[in-house]
Image (cartoon, grey):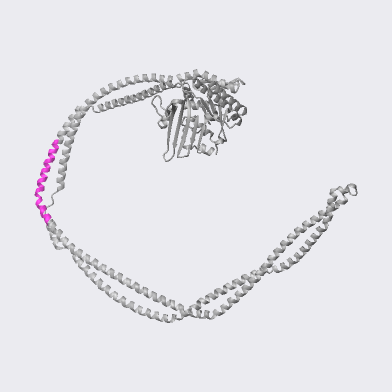
Amino acid sequence: MKQTLTGFCGIRDGLGRETITLDFEAETGGAQLVALTGRNGRGKSTILDNMTPYPVMPSRAGADGLGAFSYYDEVYLPENHKELEWVMDGVRYRSHLVIRMNGKRRTEAYLHWLSEQGWIPMRLPDGTVSDGRMDTYSRCVEGIAGSGTTFFSTAFSAQQRRQLSSYRNGEIKSLLADLLRLDAVRARGERAAEVQRLLRAGLQTAQQQVLHQRQQLVRLAAEWHQLGGDDVRAELARHNRNVAAARLDAKRTALAALRADQALAATHEARRAQLLAERTATLAERQRAIDALDTECRREGAAFDEMAERHAQRASHRETALASLRAQRTTLQASLEQVQHAERAARRLPRWRTVVQRRAALLGGLHQSLASAERVAADLRLAQSQRAAIEREAGQAALKAQELRQRFMLTAEVPCAGMSLQSGCKLLADAHSAHALLPDASAVAARLNAAHARLDHEIAGLRQQAGQIEPLRAAVARAEARLARSRERLAGCERLAARCALLAQSGCMLTEVEARLAAHTQQCIAAAAEEEKEYGAQRRKIAELNNRRQKLARPCEAVQRIDALLADLPATFNAQALTQAVAHCEQASARLQAAEQAQLAALREQERARELARQEAQQRRACEAQERRIQQVAQHLEQWSLLNKALGNDGIIALAIDDAGPELSHLANQLLLACYGPRFSLSIQTQLATAKGELREGFDIAVHDAHSNATKSVTKMSGGERIWINECLTRAMALYLARADGPRYATLFSDEADGAFDAPHKRRFMAMKREVLRIGGYTQEYFISHTTELSEMADAVIDLERYAT
């Protein structure tokens, strides 16, 4: 077996590689138990999941490797590859999957087998060829290696795989049916179920048709009863038609008389039309004269409005000019009042300049004094820090002198004083050396005390000088405020003095503005008088036009004469009576037509009643024939239902599972005895007792405990014991499958199946693996375990740490 993975996220994240190639045949050298080792996250599960030709990674898919799975979530390159060479029944195959993610996602899958001519595409006996499509690839793989359900349930133990005890009845029986090669029975059962479904659908359709036919019979009977007495209805319709024809003849006679009267009144209508035309022409001419006068009045009114607007604009311009002159006069008068203030400011300007100079000089002297005081304060802080350092150094010198005196006093206290041991006593030698150092320590202390006294005298003088700093700061602030006020007053005086020359011209300008104001006032009075004259002339013209229009609005003599002639003419012919007569004739004609249609409808209903009677008899015969066919289909449906149940999971398949149950139990118990001892033994039950004591189809694994001499369901056992039972039963199924006909798996796979075991049970688990390989005749098993002891018990180890970059 040889594997190459390119672009898988698990390999990139775990090993830091884009591509990895593993030659398992060269790595293992024919070993039976092969361990994949490495730290968590090294990609072990990714490699193990891809060691099968099935297009799925079982640890990622869930549902025991048969759930929803997509390679696109496990790769990251634009083009990714999975290449696997594997052997089945002595034939070498090569699977090549290409997962493309550059733009549109697409997966291509190819399966080749090695012949004497080289690698050629796989072709099944039914003609299926691996042409790159995923569905043909999957069919080819299952045609060679068998169903993926059986493989992942017996030969591949993925992470988080469901235990057999958690399978539902239908799921476990489907799995065992695949295991027992009952595909033919299941296929016949599916065909029987399909026939049953078709018969049931046909039966429902037939029943609906019978129901519809019965409804048709009821409807036909109701319609036939509604059409009862058709002969009497036809005779009544004939009589109504004769009465309508007589009424139509009477209405037509009355209409002819009215049309004769209409011809006589036509001459009177011609004269009336002539007089009305003359009256209309007279009124139109009079209206045209009134419209002309109205147009002239509107034109003169518009001219009056235009003149008023023009005069208003002129008046507005005059008022604007007058307001401007008055504003100039007010401004010049105010300027004359400020002349005295400006002259006084010019006289006081030299004095304020002198004041500003003196106060600036005073502020400079205060700044210098303040700087000197701040330097004295800095010297004071420096002297204080030096005194503190001397105090610390003096304290240390005093402590050292005291220590030396204590060491020297030991000369009189040591036990060897005055004895022959005195010359070799180290304590006495140290005391004499301390006596030699005492004068130096005393001199240092005296020097430090003198320096401390000198600094105390210096600090006292500096404190007296530094006490003037706060009064100096207050004096500087007051001097700065006085200087700012003096500069502000000097600036005001300079501004007023600069305007003296300009204010001196205000008198001449005021005289000129007053003269212009008087002349403009006279012009305004003259213009107002001229405008009033124009208003009077326009008002007189408009009044004359209004008088002429009032005369035309009075009654006209020609119109009154025409109205008298119109009154002498006879009354107008009553056209409404003629219209009513025509309408009555049309109504009578419509009634005659309706009576004729009613007579025709009565004849048709008579014929319809005869047809309904014939249809009812025919529909009744068809309904009875359909009911006989329904009874026949129901009988066939019962037979096929019985056949479907017999060929289903609860029929022959259940019996076959019952027959295989002892063999599976024997293999599982053999594995339990080899790796766990004689404590547990199991049996497979396909019929379970209900609460009423009756038996029903089901599935359960009963486990007998030799220690407690009790039998209980595997679901009632502890987690670790349940894993033991599940693994033994799963491997027993694999052993049973190895003895049967069909595809034979030579390799087993296991991914961290020992995680819930303690150390002793882990070793027994390895013993079970070897027993499975021995009994089933398997070539080898690849497994993943994070227990170092189990990895060391393997025949070969593939350490992924060697492949990490």
Relative horizontal placement of residue 59, taking residue 596 as reference (left or right) = right
Give the tally of numbered discs. Answer: 0
In this picture, which residue range is highlighted in magenta? 245-274
Q: Is residue 419 above or below residue 63?
A: below
Q: Quadrant of the C terminus?
A: top right
Q: Quadrant of residue 550?
A: bottom left
Where does residue 745 sit, x and y in percent of width and height?
Answer: 49, 24
Q: Is residue 21 visible?
A: yes
Where does residue 661 sit, x and y in percent of width and height?
Answer: 51, 19
Please check the rendered image and state whether residue 272 is part of the magenta-colored stretch, yes or no: yes
Q: Is residue 72 above or below residue 197?
A: below
Viewer-nearest residue: 541 or 776: 776
The residue at 59%/29% (across/down) is 790
Where does residue 329 sit, x and y in percent of width and height?
Answer: 42, 78
Where does residue 498 sit, x and y in percent of width and height?
Answer: 49, 78
Relative horizontal placement of residue 19, taking residue 228 as reference (left or right) = right
Viewer-nearest residue: 309 or 301: 309
The residue at 19%/66% (across/down) is 551
Q: Residue farthest to the front?
A: 117
For the stretch drawn in magenta, what is the main secondary structure?
helix
Q: Quadrant of residue 514?
A: bottom left
Q: Is residue 450 above or below residue 669?
A: below
Please check the rendered image and state whether residue 634 is part of the magenta-colored stretch, yes or no: no
Q: Is residue 610 above or below residue 309?
A: above
Viewer-nearest residue: 303 or 401: 401
Q: Is residue 161 visible?
A: no
Viewer-nearest residue: 551 or 333: 333
